Image (cartoon, rainbow, N blue to C red):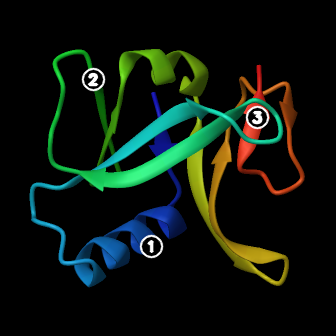
Amino acid sequence: MITVTEKAKEKLVSLKAEGNHPEEAFVRVGVAGGGCSGLSYVLDFDTVQKPDDKVFEDKGVRLVCDKKSFLYLIGTQLEFTDGLNGKGFVFNNPNATRTCGCGESFAV
């Protein structure tokens, strides 16, 4: 399962409204090759669900992940931070064995 913190939920709801995304839009999370550590996180709004997608709902947020990415993201918590060291979404991924300094890529 993939979960979200309360702060991440608030930011996702806000971004969905600001971006004029349709009501049926959901949050797509995934993994793509690249980045300092080999794999990068992908996060966006989407409206097209594919047959092999994994679907989760946490705190009223619908999260969708492709089957391949899910293998890397099992147990991940999506968090939003807006501290002095920067702001943005953070993936707390228990499967990552190494992450880069910016936190946008990882290795398993």
Alpha carbon of mark 3 to alpha carbon of mark 2: how far? 22 Å
When the figure is inspected, residue 91 is found, relative to residue 76, above or below; the finding is: below
* Quadrant hosting residue 56: top left
Q: Nearer the viewer, mark 1 or mark 3?
A: 3
The residue labelled by disc 1 is 11
When the figure is inspected, residue 8 is found, relative to residue 68, above or below; the finding is: below
Image point 28% across, 71% down: which residue? 16
Q: Amino acid at mark 3?
A: Phe
Q: Is residue 61 visible?
A: no
Q: Quadrant of the N terminus?
A: top left
The residue labelled by disc 2 is 53
Q: Does residue 13 appear left or right of residue 51 in this picture?
A: right
Label 3 crowding class (10 Å Cα cut-off): few <14, some 14-19, many 20+?
many
Q: Earlier in the sequence, mark 1 or mark 2?
A: 1
Image point 60% across, 57% down: which residue? 79
Location of residue 42 in the rendering, given as x and y in whole percent from the top left corner: 51, 45
Q: Quadrant of the C terminus?
A: top right
Q: Amino acid at mark 1?
A: Lys
Alpha carbon of mark 1 to alpha carbon of mark 3: how far? 23 Å
Do labels 1 and 2 touch, CB within 8 Å? Answer: no
Image point 72% across, 29% down: which residue? 94
For residue 58, the mark is none
The residue labelled by disc 3 is 106
Do labels 1 and 3 touch, CB within 8 Å? Answer: no
Helix or strand or loop: what does disc 3 sit on?
A: strand
